Amino acid sequence: MSAKIFSTVDVEIPILSNSGLKLKPVTLEDSTAYYHFIKKNQEYLMEWIDSINYSFTEEHAKKEISKVLLQKGRGTEMKYLLWKFSDVIGFLKFRINPEVDAGFATFSYVLGRSNTSQELFLSTCRKSIGLFFRSGPIDCLSVEVTAGNTNASVIPKKLGLKYIGKSIASQELHGKKVDKDIYIISRRGWVQRYGLEV
């Protein structure tokens, strides 16, 4: 599998005219802006993301993005940064495991502490998922939310994904094993709900 799998989704995704928002595939040149996003939201992000801690540096940001780009080249991961004018305020990521099922993707997302409404972020997630179902390589999509993260669990519920249960002690979070809530939707289910609009 190669980067060609992402060729139809490796694009900027329009959000809302005059909102200052844009969703763009991450590049190495975004390292500094991504680092500032992490540091600005560090306390909040540390609660839910194992790789974020007080020692996170700009070099860590570069290495993280380099790893994402490597996986993108292999056709297994696509990450977008959500910008508001010149600042990163969140990110979205799609992961594909071809060894399990090349048509199955896991979708994750983070919105930092900003004045962007949840409804607007929900629209951003919907547009990106719609693009992947319409033009991308996936037939089914799951969202895995750390149990107890009520803010994050709102997204799959409002998008119409089906809750299928917990993955017990499947996530490492700062030295502890925690559960994840699993939500899922098929391409057919998405099209029935939203059509093929982006």
Image: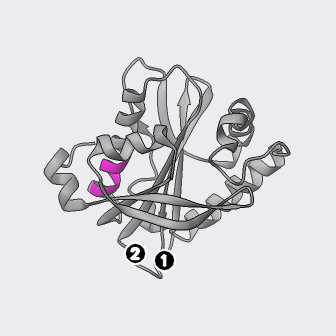
Q: Identify the magenta region.
A: 128-133
Per the model, the C-alpha gap separating discs 2 and 1 is 9 Å
Which disc, if any, is residue 102? Answer: 2
The crowding category of the residue bearing disc 2, from other C-alpha atoms within 10 Å (few below 14, some 14 to 19, many at least 20), is: some
Q: Nearer the viewer, mark 2 or mark 1?
A: 2
Contact, mark 2 vs mark 1 (Cβ under 8 Å) = yes
Q: Amino acid at mark 2?
A: Ala
Q: Is residue 10 left or right of residue 195?
A: right
Mark 1, secondary structure of its residue: loop
Secondary structure type for disc 2: loop
Q: Is residue 9 left or right of residue 63?
A: left
Residue sitting nearer the eye, 90 or 184: 184
- Identify the residue at the far bottom of this view: 99
Quadrant in which residue 64 is drawn:
bottom right
Q: Which residue is mark 1?
A: 1
The C terminus, quarter of image: top left
Name the colour scheme. one colour
Q: Taking 43 as reference, is 9 left or right?
A: left
Give whichever of 76, 27 is nearer the camera: 76
Q: Is residue 82 visible?
A: yes
Instruction: Give, as a three-letter code, the residue at label 1.
Output: Met
Q: Eyeballing the image, is 84 above or below 103? A: above
Q: Residue at x 37, y 35 (%)?
A: 122
Q: Is residue 49 above or below residue 1?
A: above
Q: Residues within 10 Å of mark 1 (few under 14, many from 20)?
A: few
Disc nearer the start of the sequence (2/1): 1
From this viewpoint, which residue is outermost toward the left?
Answer: 192
Q: Residue at x 47, y 37 (%)?
A: 151
Q: Is residue 25 magenta?
A: no
Q: Residue at x 39, y 40 (%)?
A: 154
